[in-house]
Structures are given as structure tokens and as C-alpha cells.
Amino acid sequence: MFDIGCLLDSVGWIVKYPETGHIMFSKKTVMIAGMIVLVAICIIGLSVSDKLGYPSFRPGFAIFFVAPFQEHTTRSIRFVRDIWNHYFFLVSVAKDNTRLKKSLNHVAEKNNRCNETELFNSRLRSLLNFRRTMDERVLAAEVISKDPSPWFKSVIIDKGKSDGVERGMPVVVSEGIAGLVTDVSYLYSKVLLIIDQNCAVDSLIQRTRVRGIIKGKSDQCFFEYVLRKHGIMEGDTVISSGLDGIFPKGMRVGIVSDVARMSPGIFQQITVTPYVDFQKLEEVLVILNLPEHEIVRP
């Protein structure tokens, strides 16, 4: 059996006198017991006075003893509650922050796709409107890659023999002439751009009807074999003549950006800036129903 006396004796709360055999409580025990009883009486008194509605029943000494305990207890409870609430609040905020970031990324990606679709539709509308001005049968194609070499200016489109594309067919966009097909596989085709040094377009100045040959060089073109006697001005529009049997007549090629009449030669050196921005070339039209021919090289 558990002996409470032994326990109290071990902690020094009781004193046993061997001479008489009496057991007496120590002063420490008496003081603690007295304090407990006093606090209990004060709490009971305060509770009774609250229930009876007599504030005057509260003795001052009761408040004096009870108030410090109540204050300490209240502060401890508030401290623990604040830590508990803030911990869970921070955990909740972290979860909400992660969720909102994911939601924001999803919305940003969706908005980006919508913007890209809008730009794509705008380009397609431009090609469609341009298609309506043409009598030839055309095929829309998308540029899927560009030649990384600095010596060649060409692109690959996602249409080939299975779609009716053949070697030598002209490729155009709404801004003007883009190039011509030089190699064809079953699903893909290679398009040589007019800014390539191996490409040539028989052209003329729209204002004066002076003929020449457009040849590519780097990111621009030169209008070659134009005699010095012909008055060519900066800002003149260069169009295709249709005499090469490749490109339809009257399609825009570029605009004259510089004219140099060199004294020793008989030809002018005319620089032409293409209308097509080849850095932004994404969709093109392949003209399908021209007669079969070989690429004409001057």
C-alpha cells in the first residue's frame, strides 16, 4: 500500500519525534497550507460576491493576494495562446502564399497563351486578307526552323510533297516576296530567302519601270544591272517583273534605301531594304499553281 506519510516525510513536510512518537507538520508545510487555504478563501469570496452582485463584499486583502496570481495566470495564458495562434497563422500564410503563387503562374501562363493566340490569329487574318487579293492557289505553311549558318539565309517549313509543294515554287507573305522552295521532302521543304546571295528576282522600279535583278547580301538586297542614266531615287518601291517565270508580277520586293553612282562604272549601286522582316518570319504562303520550271540564275 502507498504510504502518504512516507512521501511527506521524504520531502520534509512532516517531522517525527522518536521520543514521543508524535508526528508534527513542519513550518514549511504549515505556511504552504496556509497560503493555499487563504487563496482558496479569497477566490471563493470573490466568486460569491460576483454571484450575489455585492461588489462591496470584496475585501481588499483578498484582491491584494489574488490579483497577482490572476495577473500571472492571465499573462501566461495569453502568451501561450499568442504563440499557438501565430504559429498556425504563419503555417496558414505559407500555405496560402504557395497556393497563390501557383495560381498566379497558372494565370500568367494562360494569359501568355491567349496573347500568343491573338498574335497568331492576327497574322493569319493578314495572310487571309492577302490571299483574297491573289488569283493563284496558295498553301499556308509555318516556319519551324532557320538555317544557323551565317553564309546561307534559308528556313524550313512544315509542308512538303504530301501537301503538293514542289521545288521552285515561290513563297510570299502579305508584306511581299519571301523566297522560293529549293529542296522538298515528303513532309518538309527548304525555302531560300531573297536575302541569300544565291537568290535572284527579276524586278523593276514601280515609278520608272526600270528593270534590274534583285540579289541578296546579308540582311539586305542590291538592285543590280541598272544603268547610270536611269533616275533612281531613295524611297522608290521595287516590285517583281514576272519575267523570270518564278514570282508573279507586281509583288513588292523592297524599298530603295541608298543610291550610289560610281564614276568608273556604267551601273548604279542601289541598295534595297526588303519589305519582309525575316527575323520575324513565322507563317508563309506557298504559291502552288505556277507552271513547272527550273530556277533561273542570271
Image (tube, helix red, strand yellow):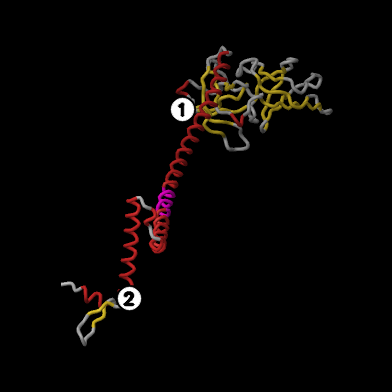
Q: Is residue 24 left or right of residue 131?
A: left
Residue 168, relative to residue 16: is it above or below? above
Q: Position of residue 74 (x, y in %)?
A: 40, 57
Q: Quadrant of residue 238?
A: top right
In the image, which residues are magenta? 82-91
Work out whether mark 1 precedes mark 2 in sequence or the reverse, and give the earlier one: 2
Residue 39, relative to residue 291: is it above or below? below
Quadrant into which the C terminus falls: top right
Q: Secondary structure at mark 1?
A: loop
Gap in angstroms between the C-alphas marked 1 and 2: 101 Å
Q: Give the foreground label among 1 and 2.
A: 2
* Residue bearing the label numbered 1: 187
**23 and 153: which is toward the camera:** 23
Q: Secondary structure at mark 2?
A: helix
Magenta-drawn stretch contains 122:
no
Label 1 Cα crowd, 10 Å radius (few <14 / some 14-19 / many 20+):
some
Residue located farthest toward the top when viewing the structure as drawn? 135
Q: Which residue sits at x=38%, y=57%? A: 58
